[in-house]
Amino acid sequence: MTRTMITLTTQAVQELKRLLAEKQAPTGTGLRLGVTRGGCAGMQYTMEVTQQQQEDILIEKDGVSFFIAKDSTEYLEGCEVGYHFDLTDSGFKITNPNAARSCGCGTSFEAKGEEGSYDPANDCK
């Protein structure tokens, strides 16, 4: 059985369409998602409006492209990418079933299987 790489909410797709139109982005531009070491909880999300890189996984929905960095697939598989409108913190948000815990700001997480590497002294301020 093949798992869905990520799920995209209607709001995320609509917001990416709006963003690309506002930036007058060239054809082939999309939102690239990845994970790097760092942040408050050990791993942090990266998001960039850019062109697809050679080994990225392409996910297209309703005319827009999301790119998943190949080296981040183990951390992003099964995630949901949404867009939340909030008075103080609007933006693309990732709901991640691979996270054992997330920091308070929601931009970093501790991956399941890597518990214990989190240092609360580095928590977001």
Image (cartoon, rainbow, N blue to C red):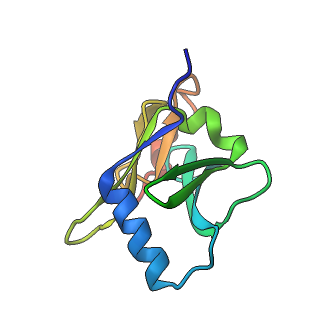
Q: Which residue is drawn at 37% across and 58% down?
A: 12
Q: Where is residue 7 in the image (x, y as percent from the top left)?
A: 42, 40
Taking depth in this image into account, of 103 and 75 the one nearest to the observer is 75
Residue 37 visible in rendering: no
Q: Where is residue 93 in the image (x, y as percent from the top left)?
A: 38, 54
- Residue found at the very far right of the displayed protein: 54
Answer left or right for 56 relative to 115: right
Q: Residue at x 65, y 42 (%)?
A: 72
Left or right of residue 70: residue 122: left
99 or 30: which is nearer to us? 30
Residue 3 percent coordinates (x, y): 52, 24
Q: Residue at x 49, y 75 (%)?
A: 20
- Taking the image as drawn, is residue 57 in sight? yes
Q: Nearer the viewer, residue 99 or 19?
A: 19
Q: Residue furthest top?
A: 1
User: Which of 107 and 78 lies nearest the eye of the viewer?
Assistant: 78
In the depicted structure, whether residue 108 falls above or below residue 116: below
